[in-house]
Image (cartoon, rainbow, N blue to C red):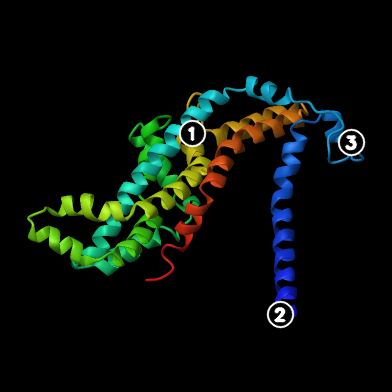
Amino acid sequence: MPRILVHRAVVYTLLAAAVLIVMFPLVWMALTAVKSNGQIINPAAPLWPTEWHWSNIPDAWGKAPFARWFANTVVFAAAATAGQLAAGMLAGYAFAMFDFPGRRLLFLLALSGLMIPFSAIIVPVAQILGDLHWLNTYQGLIVPNIASGLGTFLFRQFFLGAPRQLGEAARIDGASELRIFWQVYAPLARPATAALGIILFLQNWNNFLFPLIAVNTTKMQVVSQGLAVFQSQMTTQTQYNLIMSASLIAIVPVLLVAVAAQRHIVEGITLGAVD
């Protein structure tokens, strides 16, 4: 028994240390956001603010069109996530339930998209968007992100474990394949859909590289782009407190989503662990 207690104490201590290491940058950013520039620049200043400047947050909000950037990010993240879920679910269902020539090869091709970094195809993507006149448009932000190799993989793993008898019974009753998918198997996949949807939404919200090539106007920028522009402007004016305040504004919504949905995120990570 003592050995078990010692083992648990060591494990919990290591976990607590890891949590502190991960949380320290976030805590430092939050505390810096409510400091004055003098406290930030002074190397001898304590971590805890001696004076709380809560006005930094509304000041940062008023110096840039954050409302517009948030609206663009919500539209982009929500629409892209919905498209990725729909495409991934349909593709995963097809790969799991149907036997057709080249199924394995097509599935490997779909997974290969996860192995190719976006930076390797950034030039042709930008050229295609330009040829379609989709630069600085919502469709230019959303449509190229609809395909999801991760969604295809996870939904295939889920549907492989779904009972085939349900579909066979529905076919005997005369149900079409689309109706079987929508009314029989899609409801079973709600936990997987919720988990993957949260993961994809967080990815799309934090996406920086693709919006950087798809839009270049202030009106169409997303939060990640706007924050970079705001940082460059405030750095020249040495207003580091406003930079931290803007970073806090940008991270709070996605942090709240991640904390509220952490159980679903864990489920999504472990969903395809067993074939």
Q: Which mark is residue 1?
A: 2
What quarter of the picture does the C terminus occupy?
bottom left
Estimate the spatial distance between the alpha carbons at disc 3 and disc 1, rounded to whole Å.
35 Å
Q: Picture coordinates of residue 150 (x, y %)? A: 40, 57
In this rendering, the answer to whether 113 lies above or below 203 is below
Left or right placement of residue 14 versus residue 117 in this view: right
What percent of the width, then of the height, locates residue 142? 38, 38
Q: Can residue 148 be seen from the camera position used here?
A: no
First in sequence, mark 3 or 2: give its number. 2
Question: Can residue 265 be seen in this snapshot?
Answer: yes
Q: Which mark is residue 73?
A: 1
Query: Neighbour class for label 3 at 10 Å: few (<14), some, many (≥20)?
Result: few
Q: Earlier in the sequence, mark 3 or mark 1?
A: 3
- Secondary structure at badge 1 equals helix
- The amino acid type of the residue labelled 1 equals Thr
**Answer yes or no: do the residues labelled 3 and 1 have beta carbons within 8 Å?**
no
Q: Check disc 2 and give the amino acid type.
A: Met
The residue singled out by tag 3 in the image is: 42
In this rendering, would 190 be left or right of 22?
left
What crowding class fits label 1: few (fewer than 14 Cα within 10 Å), some (14-19), or many (20 or more)? many
Which amino acid is tagged 3? Asn
Compared with 109, 229 (above or below) is above
